[in-house]
Amino acid sequence: MRVIRAAKAGFCFGVKRALELAERTAGVSETVSLGPLIHNQQVVERMAEKGLRVVDTLDGLGRTPTLIVRSHGLPPSVYETARRAAMEIVDATCPFVQKAQRLAAEAAEVSQVIVVGDKNHPEVQGILGWAGPRAIAIEKLEEARELPYFSSLAVLAQTTQPAENFRRIVSELENHTDSLTVHNTICNATEERQTAARELAKTVDVMVVAGGRNSANTRKLADICAGLTRTYLIETAVELQKIWFAGAVTAGLTAGASTPDWIIEEVYRKMAEMNEMDSQTMATESVREE
Ligand code: F3S
């Protein structure tokens, strides 16, 4: 069995940068993040050992720790709270998300701002915060259809939005204004990983997707692959089962944008080892037959 990795898999630039900043910060001072740094339990546990504490509020933290801002970013109100509490802030907001926040804030001065994305996602909540109280988030075409007429509209996307959903909503919004400004803030890291996974899944007998079960982008990769070949989603290498690869000539491996390299490496190594064990068994059996 040949084990093939997807051409693009694992950490995107923004997550990698956030993790590096968090590692450097937690090593020298007491550090907290509002919510898990990334959607990967193994990374969260590793970072906890290094001194990064996950909290869900900045209230009542006692001694003043350093706040690491996750790659998703935060609304300005949270920066204010942190400053008032005399917390030091290490900003690991992904520069692509920062760009969306800046565009939203500028657009809000002259237009009604619409963010296409999941309203409950911290990135969208952050962008809405920068755009002010009038800004709204919509996720589906039907929601766009229900909007009234606006004299001026500006539309942005959550960085992980599917391009097709954004395109359809933008085209609907043209019916709701005579002045539409489109900021396509979709980051191609997600698209690149999905395309690479799709291409690979088309050619292999079985696919393994490594990543957090609570990570939306990992689950999406698994869905895409499952539509094309037999697919297994695992968090770590220990979950791999030899039976999954019985009779397979090729196996593919991909990983979500929040899966660290060390997990991908471990999974790859274990898949390759299973493969070697198989060929050894086959060699022994053929010697026996002779
Ligand atoms: Fe940034 Fe794109 Fe990753 S916006 S956090 S590089 S998915």
Image (tube, rainbow, N blue to C red):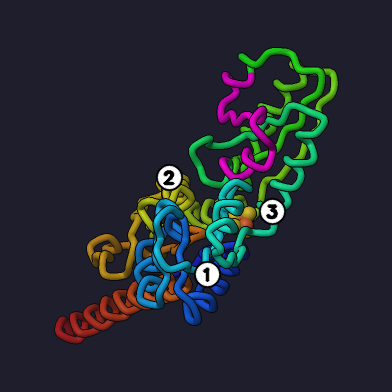
Q: Name the quadrant where ligand 1 sits.
A: bottom right
Considering only vertical position in the picture, is 69 above or below 168? below
**In the image shown, does 158 or 130 lie closer to the viewer?**
130
Residue underneath mark 1: 19
Q: Residue 230 location in percent, x, y?
A: 36, 51
Identify which amino acid the numbered label 2 is placed on. Answer: Asp
Q: Secondary structure at mark 2?
A: helix
Report the quarter where the C terminus lies: bottom left
N-term-proximal mark, 2 vs 3? 3
Q: Residue 278 location in percent, x, y?
A: 26, 76
Considering only vertical position in the picture, is 159 above or below 168? below
Nearer to us: label 2 or label 1 = 1
Disc 2 to disc 1, C-alpha distance:
27 Å
Residue neighbourhood size for the residue with mark 3, other residues' Cα within 10 Å, grouped as few (<14), some (14–19), many (≥20): many
Q: Residue 174 location in percent, x, y?
A: 77, 21
Residue underneath mark 2: 223
Is 127 magenta? The answer is yes
Left or right of 290 in this view: 78: right
**In the image shown, does 74 or 207 lie closer to the viewer?**
74
Identify which amino acid the numbered label 3 is placed on. Answer: Gln
Q: Secondary structure at mark 1?
A: helix
Residue underneath mark 3: 98
Disc 1 to disc 3, C-alpha distance:
17 Å
Identify which amino acid the numbered label 1 is placed on. Answer: Leu
